[in-house]
Image: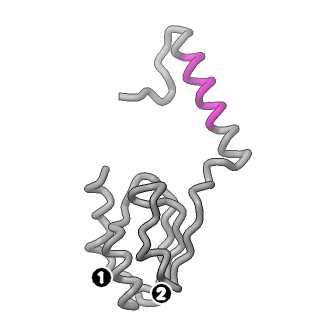
Amino acid sequence: MRSMFRAIGVALGLIAVSSVARAQSKIGYVDTQALIAALSDGAIAGAALDVYEDEPQVPAALLALDNVVCTPHMAGRSPEAEKAQTDLLLANLRAFFGGGTPVSPVP
């Protein structure tokens, strides 16, 4: 997982200065240190983040920047997301206990 956070570090040099980074996934494509450097150097205009590499810790360097908006990771707590999570859980349980294959098996 941690190596995936490095994927965007190289690409930041290809992003326009007027760009704003937005991260909302735990998949992890953002190199936090590269993002901090790009924001500090003005390589990109700003960032809006609700997911962090070492969540729940937010790097002090991000919080210190005026061109960054940091919010808690709360997207998964919407009524729609909770319903989708419940529906998926029930579908997996029905499949498993019915002798079938779960919809989203865990390797």
Circle 1 SS class? helix
Instruction: Give left or right: position of 1 versus 86.
Output: left
Q: Earlier in the sequence, mark 2 or mark 1?
A: 1
Instruction: Give left or right: position of 70 versus 107.
Output: right
Residue 102 placed where, x, y %?
49, 22
Asked if disc 2 and disc 1 are in contact, CB closer than 8 Å, the reply is no
What residue is shown with label 1?
13
Q: Quadrant of the C terminus?
A: top left
Residue 70 in the image: above or below residue 74 = below
Residue 59 in the image: above or below residue 64 = above
Instruction: Give left or right: position of 88 versus 33.
Output: right
Residue at 49% over, 82% down: 46
Which one is nearer the viewer's eye here, 57 or 16? 57
Residue at 40% over, 91% down: 42
What residue is shown with label 2?
45
Looking at the rendering, the stretch of residues picked out in magenta corresponds to 85-95
| Residue farthest to the right, as pictured | 79
| Residue farthest to the front, as pictured | 60
Residue 78 in the image: above or below residue 69 = above
Residue 5 placed where, x, y %?
32, 60
* Tag nearer the camera, 2 or 1: 2
Residue 103 placed where, x, y %?
51, 27
Instruction: Give left or right: position of 56 versus 75.
Output: left
Bin the neighbour count of mark 1 within 10 Å (Cα to Cα): few under 14, some 14-19, many 20 and up.
Answer: few
